[in-house]
Image (cartoon, rainbow, N blue to C red):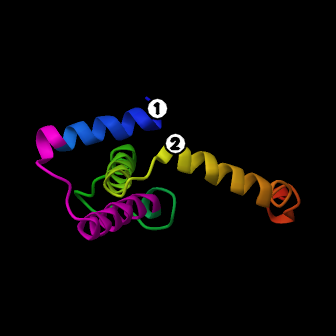
Amino acid sequence: MTIQELQTQIDQWIQDYGVRYFSELTNLGILMEEVGEVARIMTRQYGEQSFKAGDAQNLADELADVLFVLTCIANQTGINLTQAMHRNLEKKTSRDKDRHKNNTKLLSS
């Protein structure tokens, strides 16, 4: 699935099942909640914390929730994520083309 197909499919899902998009601020709050769920799993799976009984441990599902809400925000604010990602990668490439290669912190591990 391309990014544009994702945006189209989510927009269709909202029309078919979601009635309408939540407001941009509501979706921002939902995005923060979903990112928090990713953080909870990551800190327990890869950090020092342990899972509690009954903790959800499906990182893939939580990342998909983040992508869903992020795509909703892009759709409702008129952002073409394909174009935005192309511009973002161009920016990162011109700014960071040598930065990471010269970072001794990255080379030492």
Give the main secondary structure of the magenta stretch.
Answer: helix
| Residue 34 seen | yes
**Nearest to the observer: residue 95 or residue 42:** 95
Q: Are marks 1 and 2 in contact (CB under 8 Å)?
A: yes
Is disc 2 surrounded by few (<14), some (14 to 19) or many (20+) residues within 10 Å? some
Q: In this rendering, would 12 be left or right of 43?
A: left
Q: Would you identify the image quadrant in which residue 100 lies?
A: bottom right
Q: Residue at x 62, y 54 (%)?
A: 88
Alpha carbon separation for disc pair 1 and 2: 8 Å
Q: Circle 2 — which element?
A: helix
Picture quadrant where residue 37 is located: bottom left
The stretch drawn in magenta includes residue 21: yes
Quarter of the image where the C terminus is located = bottom right
> Which stretch is magenta?
15-42
Residue 101 lies left or right of residue 86; in this view the side is right
Q: Identify residue for label 2.
A: 82
Q: Which residue is mark 1?
A: 2
Quarter of the image for residue 33 reads bottom left
